[in-house]
Amino acid sequence: MIAVIHRGEKFKEVMEQFQQKQAGFIAQEIRCFDAETLYCLLEMIRGNGHKLVHITGMAV
């Protein structure tokens, strides 16, 4: 795990940028999943009580 410590005037903006980059890396990895792996990921997320904000499209 990578820890980020920032104590500046633009703390909120820096943290938001960091989170966006992390989300971008995760999205890039997910795009490479085959249908079965993607389905397992979605089931794991739903099984843990998490909610997806939205799905822009999914075809199997």
Image (tube, grey):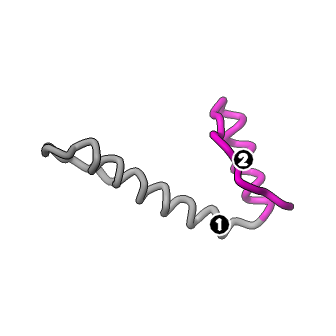
Secondary-structure class at tag 2: helix
Q: Which mark is residue 42?
A: 2
Residue type highlighted by circle 2 = Leu
Q: Which residues are magenta?
A: 35-60
User: Is residue 4 found left or right of 9 in the rendered image?
Assistant: right
Write down the quadrant of residue 2 in the picture: bottom left
Give the answer, above or below, for where 32 lies relative to 60.
below
Alpha carbons under labels 1 and 2: distance apart: 13 Å
Secondary-structure class at tag 1: helix
Q: Nearer the viewer, residue 35 or 56?
A: 56
**Is residue 9 inside the magenta stretch?**
no
Give the answer, above or below, for where 41 lies relative to 30.
above
User: Is residue 51 found left or right of 23 in the rendered image?
Assistant: right
Indicate the position of residue 22 as horizontal and vertical percent values. Answer: 43, 56
For the point 65% across and 66% down, the residue is: 31
Indicate the position of residue 40 as horizontal and vertical percent values. Answer: 75, 51
**Residue 12: in sight, yes or no?**
yes
Q: Nearer the viewer, residue 19 or 47?
A: 19
Residue type highlighted by circle 1 = Arg
For the point 20% across and 46% down, the residue is: 10
Disc 1 marks which residue?
Answer: 31
**Which residue is most to the right?**
60
For the point 13% across and 45% down, the residue is: 8
